[in-house]
Amino acid sequence: MTPFTTHTGIVATLNRANVDTDAIIPKQFLKSIKRTGYGPNAFFDWRYTADGQPDPDFELNQPRFEGRSILVTRNNFGCGSSREHAVWALAQDGYRVIIAPRIQRDGKRLPGFADIFRSNTTKNGVLAVELPEEAVDTIFTLVAENPGLKATVDLTTLKAAFHGPGPTEFDFEIEPGAREQLLKGLDDIDLTLHHVEAIDRFEAHHETWL
């Protein structure tokens, strides 16, 4: 897995809350036994018309988002099923960073991401960033007013900087274990292999009949 330290890219916005994993990668694309080829099918039902052409009404098909690699969306992104294919599709479609708001409303906390989806992003080298709702609103405004807006997201300093007419920067937090995993480019197999000596000792001495 490619380590994630900093990333600079064009910012695209998807102004939808509760985007579930079936919307990100519909179920008909889960039949493949490979982990490749999902990118063109990300957001398939929204992205294409019935005759298979790009739908001009879908936000992410706008020409100003061409080459984008940072996605800013609304809360509870990646809800629904636990399919890891959703993150594969986003990563293979070019996204390295996804930003969503955490919301406090009526004494309840509404997360930016579904828990399993967030875990799957870390496993696949995609950085999921939660920011306050007010910060995400500001980003939506910046992107609307500045076509081709770029941002730099730095996992070493935990800052996201948006390069508009005047630089706009936000601090963010991430679970320390996930941060280390991304910085070092470690997937779950890599993490397991860190304990290979202990695994070898166990296999050498445990009762094989158990």
Image (cartoon, rainbow, N blue to C red):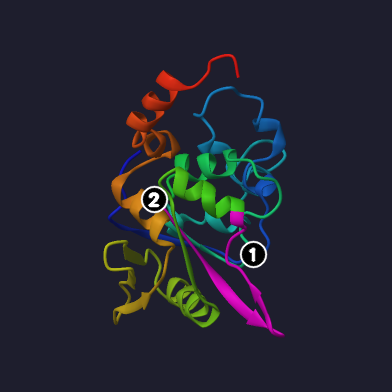
Residue depicted at 70% across the width and 46% down the height: 81
Magenta segment: does it hold 191? no
Q: What element carries label 2?
A: loop
Residue depicted at 72% across the width and 85% down the height: 106
The residue that label 1 is drawn on is: 16
Q: How crowded is mark 1: few (under 14 residues within 10 Å), some or many (20 or more)?
A: few
* Mark 1 or mark 2, whichever is nearer to me: 1
Q: Which of 106 and 91 is in front in this view?
A: 106
Q: Nearer the viewer, residue 162 or 148?
A: 162
Magenta segment: does it hold 112? yes
Q: Where is residue 150 in the image (x, y as percent from the top left)?
A: 34, 64
In what quadrant of the picture does the C terminus appear? top right
In terms of image quadrants, where is residue 155? bottom left
Q: Where is residue 40 in the image (x, y as percent from the top left)?
A: 53, 37
Q: Distance between the residues labelled 1 and 2?
A: 21 Å
Q: Earlier in the sequence, mark 1 or mark 2?
A: 1
Work out whether 67 lies above or below 176: above
How many marks on residues? 2
- Which amino acid type is shown beneath numbered disc 1? Arg
Q: Is mark 1 on a helix, strand or loop?
A: loop
Residue depicted at 53% across the width and 24% down the height: 34
Q: Give the range drawn in magenta.
A: 96-115
Q: In this view, does 84 lie to the left or right of 11?
A: right
Examine the rendering and report whether any part of residue 56 can be seen.
no
